[in-house]
Image (cartoon, coloured by chain):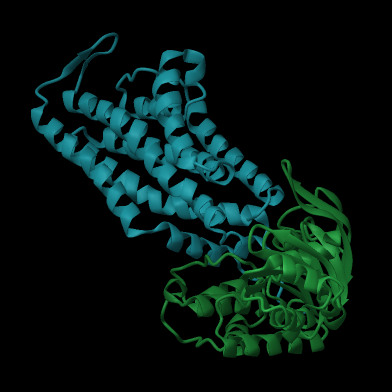
Chain colours: A green, B cyan
């Protein structure tokens, strides 16, 4: 349903997306990556909101940038929070239904607001809504005309856990109905709940793609860097050299040992044992690269 | 695929949406206050004018008519009409573009020219009473007679058509449309076009002033466009600006 071939996008000197190719079919697909990875730019290109600088984007067999009729079959939940603040949720979603020429806009609006658990008769304007309610109103306007391709840019932001679960199951139901649902996220655990195919973007490039579990294993297999602060870093370093899973040890300053390992949990146990055996007082054992940024960097650069 | 009906009306919902987003209390109060200034000056002028005015090459002209035409020209056509049009028309597409809500219209199967037309029509709808009513009341307060009222309404309406088109397009292409619009109004139309005859033809004010002069018979400086150009050119300029805005909306990036 979506075919992206060698797509690059740059804004002046800044490369937002670099030579990305992938295909997405029916079902839920997660687009995972840290902030600034190029996810939003990619999603905007899929909806025709901006044209690729290079390469081709094909959605439902057409060019979303040029084919106006395609917009009847593609919907987006954009990341920005702004809505038409003076409208009620009903008016906001009803407007989308009318502009998309839905046969019975009133019925479609009421049904879709029910799907996202918003009251169609709520007289409050969306401008007074909480972040989560605004997010749900945005999702409702995207679903009201039953699009075949639904692109959601960080749709779970601002939602409470119950609403997250509710919407994730809604996305899964849409996927099971044969819709192409592409959901972006920068939260690894969020993607796990989609239980879906994953595309990983980092630094504007497609770092990995495939089943979530395979990607997760790949991420867990990467070397970890641990910082250990103690009162005798030299003896600790010599004790750790040759230990299971340790691939490198170096000293940093007066009290710090930096250890590279392929097995962080085992290393933590080993550090404790070495410290006990050599009567070393430990001050801190902390991962240096446990953030998502470094995970993605590893997938892109192998370091 | 969704169930759809062909040719469902999308003009009115768009128009109503644009009206709602344009009408804010702050805007209305500020623009009404600007119009009230004209009425106050017109009232003061009406009671202070004594007897006919002698104008070179024309002879004696009714004093209230001369004073009124000059006031409408200098305040109404040079300030109120373009500023009200700028504030409203530049916001009609500029505001949704800036805050990101334009995406909710752009990603619907609606022809781009319909979005632009709705924005311009809504802007004109709000601007017309804010401009024409105070100016007509000003003309009445000066006691300049029916020709002055008709000339005021006609010239202000034609000017509003041109400015609405120009500033709707400006709101879509310029980041700081209000600043650029004010520069156009005060620097180009107010200064450059006054100083050079060739530049005057590129100022909307020259045409509206000519309409006012043609109807009232009061000679106004720089009003040198004859009929029908004085009527047609501003309308064509407004239409071309809207066509450009539609073309631009279809091709530019949407935030």
Which quadrant would residue A112 be assigned to in this image?
bottom right
Percent position (x, y) of residue B51?
Answer: 11, 21
In depth, the one of A167 and A149 nearer the eye is A167
Percent position (x, y) of residue A236?
Answer: 73, 71
Residue A51's place in the image compared with A120, above or below, is above
Seen at 23% across and 30% down, the residue is B68
Percent position (x, y) of residue B38?
Answer: 23, 38
In depth, the one of A302 and A256 nearer the eye is A256
Q: How many marks?
A: 0
> Can residue B7 be spotted in the picture?
no
Seen at 73% across and 63% down, the residue is A39
In depth, the one of A172 and B19 nearer the eye is A172
> Can residue A92 be spotted in the picture?
yes
Residue B114's place in the image compared with B216, above or below, is below
Instruction: Give the position of the N terminus of chain A as an image quadrant.
Output: bottom right
User: Going by the image, does A166 lie left or right of A181?
Assistant: left
Instruction: Give the position of the C terminus of chain A as an image quadrant.
Output: bottom right
User: Going by the image, does A216 lie left or right of B75?
Assistant: right
Seen at 68% across and 48% down, the residue is B252
Residue B208's place in the image compared with A228, above or below, is above
In depth, the one of B188 and A287 nearer the eye is A287
User: Going by the image, does A179 lie left or right of B108?
Assistant: right
Seen at 69% across and 83% down, the residue is A276
Percent position (x, y) of residue B213?
Answer: 35, 25
């Amino acid at each position: 349903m979506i075919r992206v071939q060698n797509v690059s996008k740059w804004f002046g000197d800044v490369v937002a997306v670099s030579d990305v190719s992938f295909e997405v079919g029916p079902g839920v697909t997660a687009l995972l990556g840290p902030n600034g990875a190029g996810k939003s730019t990619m999603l905007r290109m899929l909806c025709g909101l901006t044209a690729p600088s290079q390469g081709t984007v094909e959605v439902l067999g057409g060019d979303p940038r040029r084919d106006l009729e395609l917009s009847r079959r593609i919907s987006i939940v954009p990341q920005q929070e702004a809505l038409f603040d003076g409208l009620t949720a009903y008016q906001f979603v009803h407007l989308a239904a009318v502009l998309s020429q839905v046969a019975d806009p009133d019925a479609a609006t009421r049904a879709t607001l029910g799907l996202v658990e918003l009251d169609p008769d709520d007289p409050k304007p969306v401008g007074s809504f909480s972040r989560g309610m605004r997010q749900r109103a945005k999702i409702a306007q995207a679903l009201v005309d039953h699009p075949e391709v639904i692109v959601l840019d960080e749709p779970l932001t601002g939602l409470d856990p119950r609403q997250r679960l509710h919407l994730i199951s809604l996305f899964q139901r849409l996927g099971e109905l044969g819709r192409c649902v592409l959901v972006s996220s920068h939260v690894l655990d969020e993607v796990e709940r989609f239980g879906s195919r994953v595309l990983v973007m980092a630094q504007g490039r497609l770092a990995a793609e495939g089943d979530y579990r395979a990607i997760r294993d790949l991420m867990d297999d990467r070397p970890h860097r641990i910082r250990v602060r103690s009162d005798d870093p030299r003896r600790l370093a010599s004790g750790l050299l040759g230990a299971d899973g340790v691939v490198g040890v170096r000293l940093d300053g007066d009290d710090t040992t930096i250890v590279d390992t392929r097995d962080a949990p085992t290393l933590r146990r080993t550090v404790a044992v070495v410290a006990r055996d050599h009567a070393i007082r430990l001050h801190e054992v902390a991962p240096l690269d446990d953030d998502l940024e470094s995970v993605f960097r590893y997938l892109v650069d192998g370091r | 695929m969704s169930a759809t009906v062909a040719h469902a009306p999308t003009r009115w919902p768009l128009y109503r949406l644009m009206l709602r987003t344009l009408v804010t209390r702050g805007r209305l109060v500020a623009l009404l206050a600007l119009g009230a200034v004209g009425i106050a000056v017109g009232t003061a002028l009406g009671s202070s004018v004594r007897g006919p005015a002698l104008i070179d090459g024309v002879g004696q002209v009714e004093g209230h008519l001369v004073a009124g035409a000059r006031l409408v020209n200098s305040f109404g056509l040079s300030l109120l009409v373009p500023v009200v049009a700028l504030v409203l028309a530049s916001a009609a597409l500029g505001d949704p573009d800036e805050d990101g809500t334009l995406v909710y219209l752009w990603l619907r199967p609606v022809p781009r020219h319909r979005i632009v037309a709705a924005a311009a029509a809504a802007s004109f709808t709000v601007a017309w009473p804010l401009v024409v009513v105070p100016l007509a009341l000003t003309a009445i307060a000066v006691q300049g007679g029916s020709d002055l009222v008709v000339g005021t309404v006609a010239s202000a309406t034609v000017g509003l058509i041109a400015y609405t088109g120009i500033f709707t397009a400006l709101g879509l292409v310029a980041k700081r449309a209000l600043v650029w619009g004010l520069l156009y109004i005060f620097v180009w139309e107010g200064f450059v076009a006054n100083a050079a005859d060739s530049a005057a033809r590129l100022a909307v004010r020259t045409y509206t002033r000519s309409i006012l002069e043609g109807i009232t018979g009061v000679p106004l400086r720089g009003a040198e466009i004859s009929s029908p150009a004085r009527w047609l050119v501003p309308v064509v300029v407004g239409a071309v600006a809207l066509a450009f805005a539609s073309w631009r909306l279809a091709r530019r990036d949407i935030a």
